[in-house]
Image (tube, helix red, strand yellow):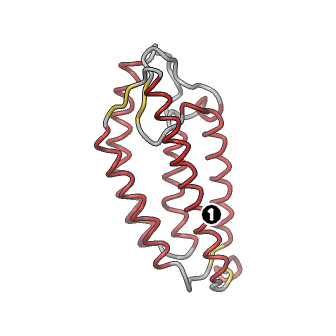
Amino acid sequence: MLEAVEIYPNVWATAAILAYVTLQRAIELGIARRNTKRLLRDGAVEVAAPQYSLLVALHAAWLGLIWLTAFGEPINLVLLGLFALVQLLRFWTLAAIGRRWTTRIIVKPGEALVTKGPYRFIAHPNYAVVVLEVFLLPAIFGLYAIAILFSLLNAGALAIRIQAEQRALKKHTRGRKRARP
């Protein structure tokens, strides 16, 4: 049954999937850097800066390890389809938060929380996307040990980050509530 949803190892398909994710991350880091500079220039503040390097290192190790191990593995088309759906949620999330999106915890004092798009339903939709991606991308190639290991490491890092972000939002925003996950 599993064979019905897999295609045999294909170097080009594997490279295309991984190149897409790598290019997406590089573009997003550029957008985040630009947004961060603008927000800080406009009076926003960064909190929990030391955590950022840890998160970047974790995600770089995750993606690098997948690049090193995915070639020669079959591609699970069902999981690839789920990953594609998660990408739609990613784009919706980034469109909803717009120019306020960064990869760092940046809060502009007095500014209301974003409550449109997926933020109507969940407090941290981008983190939900990342949780799904961290598991799904290696799982597409049957790399379940990587999927589980980095999901656990990512969960720990996100737990710390979300607490810091919630404290910053409570301190610096006008107190508008948003749905909790």
Residue furthest out toward the left: 50
Depth order, front residue of 88/16 = 16
| Up/down of 2 relative to 106, above or below | below
Residue 112: image location, x then y, percent? 52, 18
Residue 181 left/right relative to 153: right
**Local crowd at mark 1 within 10 Å, few (<14), some, or many (≥20)?**
few
Depth order, front residue of 162/110 = 110
Q: Residue at x 37, y 31 (%)?
A: 46
| Up/down of 119 relative to 30, above or below | above
Q: Residue at x 65, y 60 (%)?
A: 82
Label 1 SS: helix
Residue 117: image location, x then y, percent? 65, 32
| Up/down of 87 relative to 16, above or below | above
Name the residue carrying label 1: 20
Q: Residue at x 54, y 31 (%)?
A: 100
Q: Amino acid at mark 1?
A: Tyr
Query: Which quadrant of the rendered structure holds the N terminus?
Result: bottom right
Depth order, front residue of 145/100 = 100
Which image quarter: residue 170? Answer: top left
Residue 65: image location, x then y, percent? 43, 72
